[in-house]
Amino acid sequence: MPLWFARGLRRGVVTTRYPAQRDPSAADLPTPPAFCAEKLTREVADQLCQACPCGALSRAGDALTFDAGACTACGRCAQAVPGAVTRSGEFELAATRREHLIKQIPLVGESER
Amino acid sequence: MTAAGFSPQAGEESAEELAAAQLRRQVARQFGRSLHIRTLDTGSCAACEQEIRLLAAPHYDLHRLGLFFTPAPRHADMLLVTGPMIRAFDVAVRKTYEAMPGPKLVVATGACALGGVYQPDAFTHGGAGEMLPVDVWIPGCPPSPLALLQGLLVAVGRLAEKSRTMTFVQNGNPR
């Protein structure tokens, strides 16, 4: 009798855990952007909003609103302003509430003046 | 400062919300051992379906986790919705949801179903949340099988949600 079968009977665990180990292919997945906080001025934020094709980015006053749920990880924001945007590397993004995916990112410059 | 704006205050949860949370945990415990999934394509480009299909492949093997696909909504515990919810599907979506026995879960999959790609107009509702009570949202265009697996396990309470604490801000060494 295989060991895992005996173990399952003893512990009552009928399914396995996820993930057993980190999947190496996860490193190549397209992921939403991460923004460099110190480079985000109003001008940069407006450039980013303009580059976004799916309305994931918008600016209201001194905050950039990033909707990770609307983001398609196309990378156009990173192309528009290469220094300010990097890969976040986050792909396990499931949320139990839609609001959890909408992030407010404070801009620099304006509040310091 | 960013996360605090959206998190419900700990002391302010009403009795109904606490009861709902307890019920949700009970349902999740039941579904955590065996869950049957019905997929519903509401006008997606089929990229999401491609990734969902890969879940059954040996590399991801969702059956080891007690998750199964079923062709009939009457046998399903979870509705996995893709696409921007086009209006031509209104009747089909309602019938599918009503045919499922309760308790049931709804998972919105992909940027379209989360309202990212299409705005509401004459042809689409612009997201699954407009028509169905969504329990878990899985972003991505399309979400990879790994992201889908994590989303499904979040839905049945076997993994904790990660996205709530993500900031998408990187401080220091800009490349």
Image (cartoon, rainbow, N blue to C red):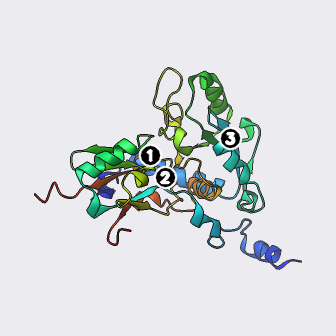
**Residue for badge 1:** A98
Residue B59: x, y in percent?
Answer: 74, 63
Left or right of A18? Residue B132 is: left
**Residue for badge 2:** A95
Kindly identify the residue that appears in the image at 43 percent across and 53 percent down: A79
- Quarter where residue B147 is shown: bottom right
Kindly identify the residue that appears in the image at 78 percent across and 61 percent down: B58
Q: Are the residues tagged 3 and 2 within 8 Å (C-beta)?
A: no
Q: Are the residues tagged 3 and 1 within 8 Å (C-beta)?
A: no
> In which quadrant is the C terminus of chain A drawn?
bottom left
Q: Amino acid at mark 2?
A: Ala
Up/down of B82 relative to B123, above or below = below
Is disc 1 on the same chain as disc 3?
A: no
Label 3 sits on a secondary structure element that is strand
Q: Amino acid at mark 1?
A: Arg
Q: Depth check: give the residue in front, A108 or B111.
A: A108
Q: Amino acid at mark 3?
A: Thr
Residue B92: x, y in percent?
Answer: 65, 26
Which chain does tag 2 point to?
A
**How many neighbours does mark 2 have within 10 angstroms: few (below 14), some (14-19), or many (20 or more)?**
many
Residue farthest right in this picture? A1
State the CA–CA distance, disc 3 to disc 1.
20 Å
Which chain does tag 1 point to?
A
**Residue for badge 3:** B39
Kindly identify the residue that appears in the image at 39 percent across and 58 percent down: A82
Which chain does tag 3 point to?
B
Q: Depth check: give the residue in front, B116 or A78.
A: A78
Q: Are the residues tagged 1 and 2 within 8 Å (C-beta)?
A: yes
State the CA–CA distance, disc 1 to disc 2.
7 Å
- Quarter where residue B171 is shown: bottom left
